[in-house]
Amino acid sequence: MSESDHEATWISKSQRKRDCHALQEISDRLLALRPEELALIDLPAELEEAVTEAQRIRSNSALKRQRQYLGKIMRSCDSEAIAQQLNRVAHRNDTNTARFKKIEQWRDRLLDADKEVLGEILRQIPDLDRHHVHNLVRQAAKESRENKPPAASRKLFRYLRELMEASGSFTQHP
């Protein structure tokens, strides 16, 4: 082995530790996923089984050992591709959250009798049935005055969400 080959393959202990910590962070992010989110990520079978097993473990010491095993498996995987897939899943969740917050704002503004919100909604969701929305808002106001559960408010949210999904507004990115 020549001196230049030795220099090219030599990695400092600090760099190896940083690399291991980066792999550990990726495996911790995998452990935090729900099963339906985990299914969206293309993982090697061995890694997927190890993650699923780690999610079932309740003992701290056993979980620590399983996390070390995950780190060992991660060294032989394409960690960059897995990290990119994790970021896409996280972005998908951010998109869902943004959509839900927007719908909640619309509903709350409708219930507060904001005159401009209906125009905003119609620009994004042209299929909106104004009559149905007005009835739901009226019912929600009545329920609020009578201190009843907010069934109409929930129906309004559901109606807006279904129309938004059907119209393709705020499309999801897998």
Image: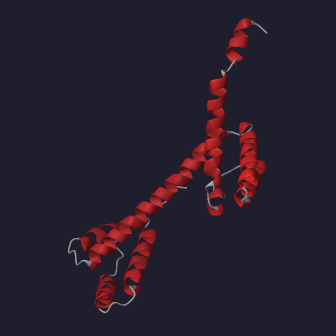
Name, please, the residue furthest toward the top. 3
Answer yes or no: is residue 44 visible: no
* Residue drawn at x 40%, y 77% as measured from the top left: 157
Q: In terms of depth relative to the viewer, which is nearer, 38 or 21?
A: 21
Answer yes or no: is residue 139 visible: yes
* Residue drawn at x 29%, y 67% as measured from the top left: 123
Image coords of residue 155 (percent x, y): 41, 83
16 w.r.t. 136: above or below: above
Q: In terms of depth relative to the viewer, which is nearer, 148 or 159?
A: 148
Image coords of residue 160 (percent x, y): 39, 75
In the image, taking residue 141 as reference, residue 164 lies left or right, namely: right
116 w.r.t. 142: above or below: above
Name, please, the residue furthest toward the bottom. 146
Image coords of residue 35 (percent x, y): 66, 62
Scheme by which the image is coloured: secondary structure
Which quadrant is home to the C terminus? Answer: bottom right
Hey, which quadrant is residue 121 in on the image?
Answer: bottom left
Image coords of residue 47 (percent x, y): 74, 48
State the count of labels.
0
Which quadrant is home to the N terminus? Answer: top right
* Residue drawn at x 63%, y 25% as measured from the top left: 14
In the image, taking residue 163 as reference, residue 56 lies left or right, namely: right
Q: In terms of depth relative to the viewer, which is nearer, 161 or 51?
A: 51
Hey, which quadrant is residue 12 in on the image?
Answer: top right
62 w.r.t. 169: above or below: above
